[in-house]
Each structure stands twice: as structure tokens, then as C-alpha cells.
Amino acid sequence: MPPYVVALIGKYLCYAILAVALDLVWGYCGILSLGHGAFFALGGYAMGMYLMRQIGARGVYANPILPDFMVFLNWKELPVAWWGFHSFAYASLMVMLVPGLLAFAFGWFAFRSRVTGVYLSIITQALTYALKLAFFRNDFGFGGNNGLTDFKDVLGFSVQSDATRAALFSISALALALAYLVSKAIVSSKYGKALIAVRDSESRVRFLGYRVENYKLFVFVVSAVMAGIAGALYVPQVGIINPSEFDPGNSIEAVIWVAVGGRGTLVGAALGAIAVNFAKTYFTGAFPEYWLFGLGGLFVLVTLFLPKGLLGLLNMRRAARPAAAPPSPAAQEEGVQ
């Protein structure tokens, strides 16, 4: 495949991981999160900070410690939040830890306060919008409006080389497979059955004595960590991370991917993410002014006529096929003769 196609499909695979993470909480636990883009972006920023530290003296201002935007803003020392990001191991830990801790803190208060339904969705959306505003500030220390870019290499390999792009593509595909297997293991276990029960009738599960908030909190944190990993794989393939990744519209778009592919299927969520983003790439190039209208219309149509998504439709058609009729006794006798 041409290098640009490899990078493009690699980006789609990262979106597919995000979709699987969202399907885990929405499709199986009934938590409609409109803020998963925040966890994706936080994982991306953690990886972006590592990539910025790798530039060193090769930057425009040739400062071996401070990124170029800090030198431009006349910063004298590296902020505490950036300490340790010269290490890939530390950055990888932060990719999972930061989204996971944020999800834990948010979920602890929200789920124990029994915030559910549309109220929870609005709060998750407010969370990602607040983070977007914070990361836009230059004094926050994360590049402000321009974000982090001009990456040189990862683990000593140029991010622009075809071999590195192919490796990132392969790692993204492997990460998607692992995300699916982990999610499948969760939903197929007794724990997963409890999650489905919470989705279908939370009050009844609570009445039976289950600590519903603990189930929700666990799956929410796992989902956030998956989203952070997706963001970390996304950044070196696209070459930039900025506050626009926190835009609430991105989280809403991820919900559309899951709805189109099939909520509560995992595979459908991943396929929906890839299909919708493939269509986005084409239509934003051919008919850019109509894409958002088309995306909104697609969501309405799926909600009204395909509530189980495209994969759900295929499963229904497969189940509706009549079983093959057994051969008649006469035919059997003829066969014997």
C-alpha cells in the first residue's frame, strides 16, 4: 500500500479502538458517554509530550530541554507536568494512568451520586469541553491553540519513514485486536452479564443487592484506558495533537460510529468507525459542505430504522433465513436405490 494509505488506515484503526471502548460502556452497560474524546485526547497528549521531548536540540531554537513553544513564550524551565516524559516507559504509563485516573475520579462521584441517563451524558460532555478550554491556554503548558507537533522520531525511528508508519499500523491493528479480546472477555464473563443487567434494569439489579456503582466504575475506567491507548497510537501517525481533539463534537461522532455499526456488538462498533471515517475522507474531499448534514441524517436514519445498527441488521437477516427442509422419504428411498 502507498505510505499515505497506510497512515490513513492506521488512523481508522485508532478510531476503531475508541469505538470499541465506547461500545463497552454504552452497548453493554448503558452509559452514554459524550466525553470519551477527552480520554482519547489525554492519551494523545501524553504521547505527544514524549515525542516533543525527543526533539531536543533539533528544534528551531536548539534548546535541548524546552520544546520550541516554551522557548518562544520565554519559559525558563520545564514544567513539573513534563518531568519524566523523556522516557518512553513513563510516557506509556501516563497514556493509561491519566485517562484512567480521570475516569475513576469522575465515575466515583457521578455513579455514587446515581447520576444516570441524559444527565450523565451532559456532564461527560461538560467535562471534555472544560478540558478543551484549559488546554487552549498557553500558560497551561501544553502548546495552547497550536498544540504539539513537528515530531521527529519515536524510540529512535523517524516518524516520517515508511517503515515506522508500517510498524505503527501493525501495532494499531494489534491493539485493536487486544481491545476486542479484552472487551469480549469482560462481556462474556459473569461480570459482563451483570453489566448487561444494569443496562436493562439498573433499579432491579440494585434491589437485588448488587453495588451497581462498582460495576459501572470498573467498566468506565477500563474503557477510558482503551481510549487513551487509541489516542497515543493516533498522534505519531497524524503528526499533531491540539485542543480541537477535546471538542465535544468528536465524542458525539464516536457515538454515531457505534450506532451505525451496531451497539452492543464490539465488532460492529469497530466496523462502524472504519466505514464512517472512510466515508468522511471521501465526502469531505468531494462534497465538504454536505458532510455534516449527511452524518446527521445517517444518525437519524439509523436511530429510527436500524436501532441495532448494520451488524444487527445482518444478524437479524441471518436468523430469519428458513432452515433447509429435510429430504422427503421418497427422495431418501431413491437415494438408497
Image: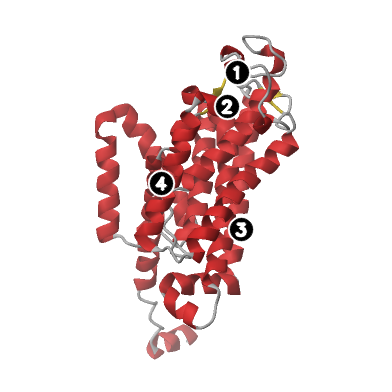
Indicate the secondary structure of the residue bearing disc 1: helix
Indicate the secondary structure of the residue bearing disc 4: helix
Q: Are marks 1 and 2 in contact (CB under 8 Å)?
A: yes
Which comes before the other along the chain, label 2 or label 3?
A: 2
Q: Position of residue 334 (x, y in %)?
A: 43, 85
The nearer-to-camera label among 3 and 4 is: 4
In the figure, 331 relative to 212: above or below? below
**87 horizontally vs 290: left or right:** right
What is the number of the mark on residue 70? 1
Which comes before the other along the chain, label 1 or label 2?
A: 1
In the figure, 325 relative to 307: above or below? below
Q: Which residue is mark 2?
A: 141
The nearer-to-camera label among 1 and 3 is: 1
Distance Cα–Cα, label 2 vs label 3? 37 Å
Q: Which residue is mark 3?
A: 181
- Residue sitting nearer the eye, 153 or 31: 31
Q: Amino acid at mark 1?
A: Met
Distance Cα–Cα, label 4 vs label 2? 22 Å
Q: Are marks 2 and 3 in contact (CB under 8 Å)?
A: no
Identified at 49% across, 63% down, the residue is: 111
Residue 164: quarter of image: top right
